Amino acid sequence: MEYKTIKLIREDKIAFLYLNRPNVLNALNETMKEELIHALKEMEENDDIRVMILTGRGRGFCAGADLSRFVEFQESDKDHRKKSRFGSIDLPRAFIQYPKPIIAAINGPAYGFGFTVTLTCDIRLASQRAKFSCAFVRVGVTPEFGSSYFFPSLLGHGEAAGLIFTARPFDAHEALEIGAVNQVFPHHRLIPEARKMAQQIASMPPTAVQKSKELLRHGMQSTLDQVIQHEAVVFLDAMKTEEHQAAVNKLLAQIKSKRDEARRSNKSRRRQA
């Protein structure tokens, strides 16, 4: 599929997914929505891809929903009787159910959807130029994209309520302080650092990484007793995989090699003595 509003680049087990409408700060429109769903499915089915980096083209990450979408809806449904495409949960579900790790590399302003989409990602890295806002009430709408679940889970109810009710903007350093992002970097280091982290994740056994993501998501929605039971089942399943056996054999070989090297070194020192 040839994309018009996003750009997908594959690079050694890593997929770079760019929001690509820089002239409108990568605002979300219907085409971008459909293309994101398609790209996520495509990368889910590609066994060569182990990690995805989500970022934006130009000076912004994403300014939120394209305001022209709201205008079109108001004009086409003045009596508010039609079923709106705004009610679709296909896009948030595509992000939330994506089985591989997603790193959000937030390169600039991230407002509304531009902020909430990062909450569905597993790791959030921000440029010092990044700015955030839960801008929903400012335009008379309410939080979406699972943010009323993720935001209080990350920050606590009080912090989330303050930012949502006031729609006030905040910068990358405040985002780091309150736990909305994992790390903040100088702008020129953002993508290299995201790539470095993605490479480290991609070097790990992929099934174990994906199952770990599944466990983290399961744990967010379960009781402690449910968590430990599910963990035990998944752990035993992982022990049966060839991936696990290969990783253990590799580790044992490394340990043996270090021991042999230590023995040779000790023998050499005794001879010299």
Image: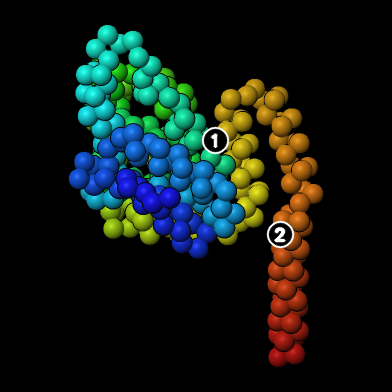
Which residue shows up at 76% across the image and 63% down it?
A: 249
Q: Secondary structure at mark 1?
A: loop
Which residue shows up at 28% across the image and 50% down it?
A: 57
Counting other residues with Cα less than 10 Å from the Cα at mark 1, is it few (<14), some (14-19), or many (20 or more)? Answer: some
- Is 57 on the left-hand or right-hand side of 104? left
| Residue 30 seen in the current view | yes
Instruction: Pick the quarter of the image with the C terminus.
Output: bottom right
Q: Nearer the viewer, residue 89 or 235?
A: 89
For residue 247, the mark is 2
Q: What is the x, y in percent for residue 205?
A: 64, 55
Can you tell which of label 1 and label 2 is closer to the viewer?
1
Residue 179's place in the image compared with 261, above or below, is above
Q: Nearer the viewer, residue 26 or 201?
A: 26
Query: For residue 113, what is the image quadrant?
Result: top left
Q: Are marks 1 and 2 in contact (CB under 8 Å)?
A: no
For residue 155, the mark is none
Residue 200's place in the image compared with 210, above or below, is below
Q: What is the x, y in percent for residue 133?
A: 28, 30
Q: What is the x, y in percent for residue 35?
A: 40, 42
Q: Mark 1 = which residue?
A: 97
Mark 1 and mark 2: Cα distance apart in space: 27 Å
| Residue 174 seen in the current view | no
Counting other residues with Cα less than 10 Å from the Cα at mark 2, is it few (<14), some (14-19), or many (20 or more)? Answer: few
**Three-letter amino acid code of the residue under disc 1:** Gln
Q: Secondary structure at mark 2?
A: helix
The mark nearer the N terminus, 1 or 2, is: 1
Q: What is the x, y in percent for residue 60?
A: 25, 44
